[in-house]
Amino acid sequence: MRFAICNELFEGWSFADVCEHVAAVGYAGLELAPFTLAPSAHELTNAQCRTLRATAAAAGLEIVGLHWLLAKTEGLHLTSPEVGVRDRTAAYLRDLARACHELGGSVMIFGSPGQRSLLPGVSVDQAFDHAVEVFSAITPDLDRLGVRLCLEPLGPVETDFINTCAEAARVVDAVAHPNVQLHLDVKAMCSEAEPVVDLVRRWAPRAGHFHANDPNLQGPGFGDLDFAPILSALRESGYAHWVSVEVFDFAPGAEVTARESLACLQRASVP
């Protein structure tokens, strides 16, 4: 398994310092939140992307791709009833795909709970149709650029739209394009009734990306969750993509979180 870590953990660090530290700890990849690079994807030029890619490569890292796609944006929403909002959202996702490609990444994780939750007067069925419309609109760009968009189920404390792997898979099936896939996140799967290991066994063969974290919002090994059976199920499923550490509680500190999370995953990945 190849392990990566998400860069927003390293608040206040220069990009070069993040790359050097992440590589020194032993990670092979770095996953990026666009808002840490520029105020908007539209402002992230191809030249800037190539410079960041070269900086990561010089440290021995591969840029995995992007997540938190719509975080800190305004006027964008996946399930808005307004056609203009959905069109702008699709355009923004196209620009992110362009940036992802120039960065050397191959995957974009669509979580963005605030920009997909049901708006007043919008039913679940209508939201489903709107989401399928937006994702379908960007598939030619995903195909051309060699970028996969992976839809992330999130727990009901974060959003009221697409809370389970099955619900995310329904959207993916409706889009019906190989570059639109399922994403699995351990924290989110812990909100489902079915055990995480069983969910991994069922859905990992369809997943294009995987986030490792604890339900306490910290990294693997910082809570009570046992990652050994989870990674065993992931390996047995034939999953062949990245496993990225994504945390939301930075209290232990970036260095400790990065080091101990990787150590946990490495122990858990031993057959």
Image (tube, helix red, strand yellow):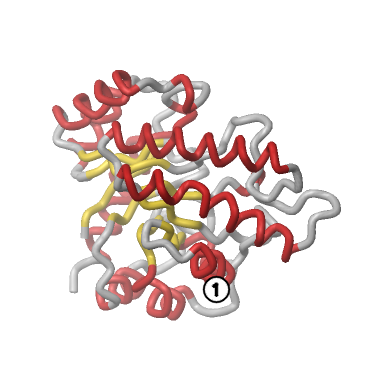
Q: Nearer the viewer, residue 214 or 186?
A: 186
At which x and y percent is residue 52?
A: 27, 25
Using a 10 Å C-alpha cutoff, classify the residue at mark 1 as few (fewer than 14 neighbours), some (14 to 19) or many (20 or more).
some
Side (left or right) of 102 relative to 186:
left
Residue at disc 1, secondary structure = helix
Q: What residue is rendered at 53% in x and 34% in y?
A: 92
Q: What residue is rendered at 35% in x and 41% in y?
A: 31
At which x and y percent is residue 118?
A: 74, 53
Q: Residue furthest right?
A: 121
Side (left or right) of 95 relative to 46:
right
Q: Nearer the viewer, residue 142 or 104?
A: 142
The quadrant of the image that shows the N terminus is bottom left
Side (left or right) of 147 relative to 43:
left
Identity, as a three-letter code, of the amino acid under mark 1: Ala
At which x and y percent is residue 57?
A: 16, 32
At which x and y percent is residue 184?
A: 44, 62
Quadrant of the rendered image containing residue 256: top left
Q: What residue is rendered at 40% in x and 44% in y?
A: 141
Whether residue 221 appears in this view of the structure is: no
Residue annotated with mark 1: 166
Whether residue 51 appears in this view of the structure is: yes
Q: What residue is rendered at 34% in x and 50% in y?
A: 143
Say how many tags the image has: 1
The quadrant of the image that shows the C terminus is bottom left
